[in-house]
Amino acid sequence: MGLLDPFRRFFRRMAESDELRYAEEIRAWAESVPGSVRIAEASPRSRVKLAGVVRRITVRPLEGHESLEAILSDGTGEVTVVWMVVGRSVDSASAPASSSRASSPSSVARTGW
């Protein structure tokens, strides 16, 4: 370890974008979740456990076929998660502080960072 290494690290971090640093933090956290798979490594049409941060939520209100869509990001890519809400409104299905688990084959196109 050279004398200038701390300064090089400091200036390298200062030159990074906030988005890149945030992606690295999310990636580090997602890798610590036991049994989870990175979005970039997930095989299409297979059951996977993903860990990440919800970046956007969209409600699609169609009569009798409401859905709730979320963009999940883990620092390696993004995936769209869709919940089909049957028999009740999206509002009651997504109450604040409610928890849910999604399990389904992944089949959504992913985008990299």
Image (cartoon, rainbow, N blue to C red):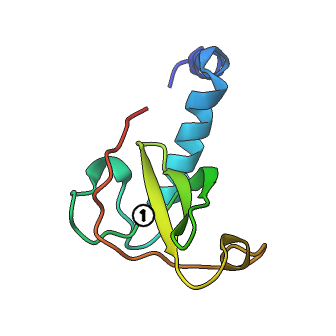
Q: Residue at 33%, 52% (x, y): give it.
A: 108
Observer-nearest residue: 83 or 99?
Answer: 83
Mark 1 burial class by Cα count in 10 Å: few <14, some 14-19, many 20+: many
The answer to whether 44 is drawn above or below residue 4 in the figure is below
Q: Quadrant of residue 38?
A: bottom left
The answer to whether 84 is drawn above or below residue 42 in the figure is below
Q: Residue furthest right?
A: 96
How many tags in the picture?
1
Judge whether residue 40 can be spotted in this image. Answer: yes
Residue 46 shown left or right of residue 8 in the figure: left
Image quarter in which the C terminus is found = top left
Residue 15 shown left or right of residue 95 in the figure: left
Observer-nearest residue: 33 or 56?
Answer: 56
Residue 91: horizontal and vertical position, in percent? 73, 72
Residue 102: horizontal and vertical position, in percent? 46, 75
Q: Residue at 56%, 62% (x, y): give it.
A: 62
Observer-nearest residue: 6 or 25?
Answer: 25
Q: Residue at 39%, 77% (x, y): give it.
A: 103
Observer-nearest residue: 28 or 100?
Answer: 100
Is label 1 in a helix, a strand or a loop?
loop
Q: Residue furthest bottom?
A: 87
Q: Residue at 72%, 79% (x, y): give it.
A: 92
Q: Which residue is mark 1?
A: 50
**Three-letter amino acid code at the position of disc 1:** Leu
Judge whether residue 32 can be spotted in this image. Answer: no
